[in-house]
């Protein structure tokens, strides 16, 4: 499109079609930068075990990915391959605690901060238990 505009309506300082062709044949990358391209980091068997143990300790794929300098996708793939459950759903014990705290008058956001979940996860769990959810408090 730009080439058509330049060719149809030349203006002072516009790039000529010959200049565009010349620029397209030049490579911006040097041979040196090509040789320094990064490859994906491959984890050894013992590192895979450490990765799984770290995930089970922190339950946070992003933190594990940063610790091992791999992508989150790689962490998720390794965990799935080894049968590690990565769902962040609440356990029965956590649901019971959340229901007790909610009945004491705490907000879903406060309960979520205490238990390490988003307030929407807390509300979904409470609704699943059949707890009557209070109307949202609005600020004025």
Image (cartoon, rainbow, N blue to C red):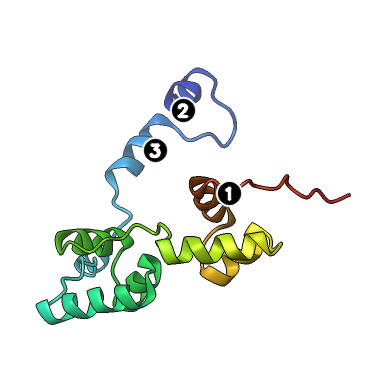
Q: Separation of disc 2 and disc 3 at Cα?
A: 13 Å
Q: Give the residue at mark 3.
A: 19
Q: Residue at x 58, y 71 (%)?
A: 114
Along the line of sight, the residue nearer the viewer: 48 or 119? 119
Q: Is residue 20 left or right of residue 85?
A: right
Q: Where is residue 51? Give x, y as percent.
A: 24, 75
- The disc, 2 or 1, on the residue closer to the chain's N-terminal end is 2
- The disc, 1 or 3, on the residue closer to the chain's N-terminal end is 3
Q: Separation of disc 1 and disc 3 at Cα?
A: 70 Å
Residue 131: which numbered mark, if any? 1
Residue 2: which numbered mark, if any? 2
Residue 139: which numbered mark, if any? none
Q: Residue at x 68, y 60 (%)?
A: 107
Q: Residue at x 33, y 36 (%)?
A: 21
Helix, strand or loop at label 2? It is: helix
Outermost residue toward the top?
A: 8
Helix, strand or loop at label 3? It is: helix
Q: Where is residue 11? Give x, y as percent.
A: 58, 28
Compared to 9, does 119 lie above or below? below
Along the line of sight, the residue nearer the viewer: 60 or 11? 60
- The disc, 2 or 3, on the residue closer to the chain's N-terminal end is 2
């Amino acid at each position: 499109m730009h080439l058509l505009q330049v060719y149809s309506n030349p203006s002072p300082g516009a790039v000529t079609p010959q200049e565009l062709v010349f620029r397209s044949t030049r490579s911006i990358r040097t041979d040196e930068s090509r040789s320094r391209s990064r490859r994906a980091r491959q984890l050894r068997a013992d590192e895979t075990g450490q990765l799984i143990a770290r995930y089970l300790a922190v339950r946070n794929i992003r933190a594990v990915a940063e610790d091992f300098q791999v992508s989150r996708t790689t962490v998720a793939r390794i965990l799935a391959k080894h049968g590690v459950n990565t769902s962040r759903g609440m356990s029965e014990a956590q649901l019971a605690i959340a229901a007790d705290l909610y009945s004491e008058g705490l907000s879903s956001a406060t309960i979520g901060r205490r238990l390490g979940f988003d307030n929407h996860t807390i509300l979904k769990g409470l609704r699943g238990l059949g707890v009557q959810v209070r109307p949202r408090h609005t600020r004025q």
